[in-house]
Image (cartoon, rainbow, N blue to C red):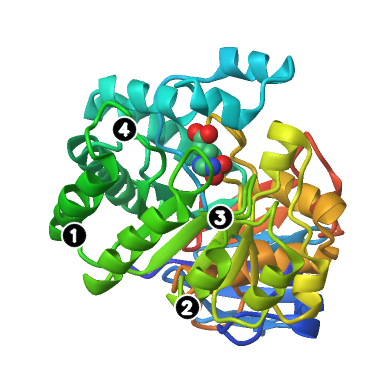
Amino acid sequence: MSRSLLITNARAVTLAGPTSPRTGPALQDLAILPRADILIENGLIASISPSPLPTPHSPPPSSTIDAAGRVLLPAFIDCHSHACWAGDRIDEWQRKLRGVPYLEILKSGGGIMSTVRAVRAASESQLRELLDLRLNAMLRCGSATVEVKSGYGLSTAAELKMLRVIRTAADHAARSTGQTVIPTALLGHAIDPDIPNFVDTVINETLPAVHAEFPGITIDAFCEQGAWSLADCLRLFDRALSLGHPLRIHADQFNSLGMIPEAIRRHARSVDHLEASTEADLDLLAASDSFGVILPACGFHVDGRYAKVRRFLDRGGKLALATNYNPGSAPTPSIPFAMALAARHGGLSIPETFHAAISNPANLLNLSDRAQITPGMRADLLLLRTTDERSLAYEVGHSPIDSIFIAGRPL
Ligand code: NIG
């Protein structure tokens, strides 16, 4: 039987427009209808109208919600997370509070490597249970679509274990809540000193094994001092490209090692972090077909440094923002919190935070069936208990999200 839902009298932040990346002045336009009726049928937006839809409907909608005094908008798309992990890093965080830098902790065998040890020790079902909890936390914060990276396995067996867990959780989420989960293989996250010729092993053994089981999956690496060098990243990326894998890259988080021009040359889907990028590199990125992704929760949790992207945006750069949900640098599942930080510290206008959290990550993840309230789009929607959508970036430590709909179904 067909399901339908009519939402009446909503202030609709439709984000209507092209499914191509939004850049420049288009980022200021949220395509708002101050009062709209939205009909949802079989999980999709069937119609949206600024004037009341004719009644009675035929057939009548299965349910109706009067959204007077509330804002309706497309759900968030969190395009960068490490939500699959075991253990915690709270002791390490206390060391960080006492002034020990993130890269120093990594160098001494902690940081990412401490989570790697916990992930290797965890069973698939333990990891799966933890991931399910975090996916749910992300969903409750309004993220109907999330990307989840591996990268805490590092050995071939443990990376495959992580990717299988993410795939199983994705299948389960699609069937239960309807949340969409997209895996990324973060094969170059750290260097494991206990695996001889680690980089060669990743390139010659882990990558082919991942390719065989997850053909076409996006490959990622962390280009940083004490993690993967520029040269080693490029070896991994060139091999991955030859096998038909798209690329995403963690670059310039603490140090600029020259990755941006190389990423652009390789048509990376995105370069993520950018806190330490040079102005010249950001100008190159703005002129390229790669996205920049900012992860401002890192600045909040790690050391107060934020990517500054005002000039990048003014030069037409394609920008997304994400939580980076992980135990070491960004322990938050909340896109609204990332929006709040991006507006305060990244140089984004408030409308830009919406496009960076919704329309642009949809394009980055090749999802052209969502991220706007227009006919034919998936009805992944958020209803806010406020008349002003700017509350999303304004309020902190509290969420104005009232209800979440995934493919038209209330959570
Ligand atoms: O993007 N920097 C690399 N990866 C994550 C942090 C992972 C961790 O510290 O466990 C990031 O910040």
Kind of residue indicated by mark 4 = Arg
- Find out whether the residues at labels 2 and 1 contact each other: C-beta distance under 8 Å: no
Is 384 placed left or right of 56 in the picture?
right
Picture residue at 79% right of the left edge, 49% below the top? 340
Query: What element does badge 1 sit on?
Result: helix
Kind of residue indicated by mark 3 = Ala
Q: Nearer the viewer, mark 3 or mark 4?
A: 3
Q: Residue 402: horizontal and vertical position, in percent?
A: 69, 47
Q: Nearer the viewer, mark 3 or mark 1?
A: 3
Picture quadrant of residue 387: bottom right
**Residue that label 1 marks:** 211
Query: What element does badge 3 sit on?
Result: strand
**Residue that label 2 marks:** 265
Query: What element does badge 4 sit on?
Result: helix
The disc at residue 383 is none
Quadrant of the image containing the N terminus: bottom left
**Residue that label 3 marks:** 251
Q: Mark 1, residues whose alpha carbon is within 10 Å: few (<14), some, or many (≥20)? A: some
Q: Residue 214: horizontal and vertical position, in percent?
A: 21, 58
Picture quadrant of residue 238: bottom left
**Residue that label 4 marks:** 128
Q: Nearer the viewer, residue 182 or 304?
A: 304
Q: Earlier in the sequence, mark 4 or mark 1?
A: 4
Q: Residue 235: horizontal and vertical position, in percent?
A: 32, 61
Kind of residue indicated by mark 2 = Arg
Measured in 3D between alpha carbons, the distance from the residue under mark 2 to the one under mark 4, in whole angstroms, is 37 Å
Report if the beta carbon of the residue with label 1 is closer than 8 angstroms to ligand 1: no
Q: Earlier in the sequence, mark 2 or mark 1?
A: 1
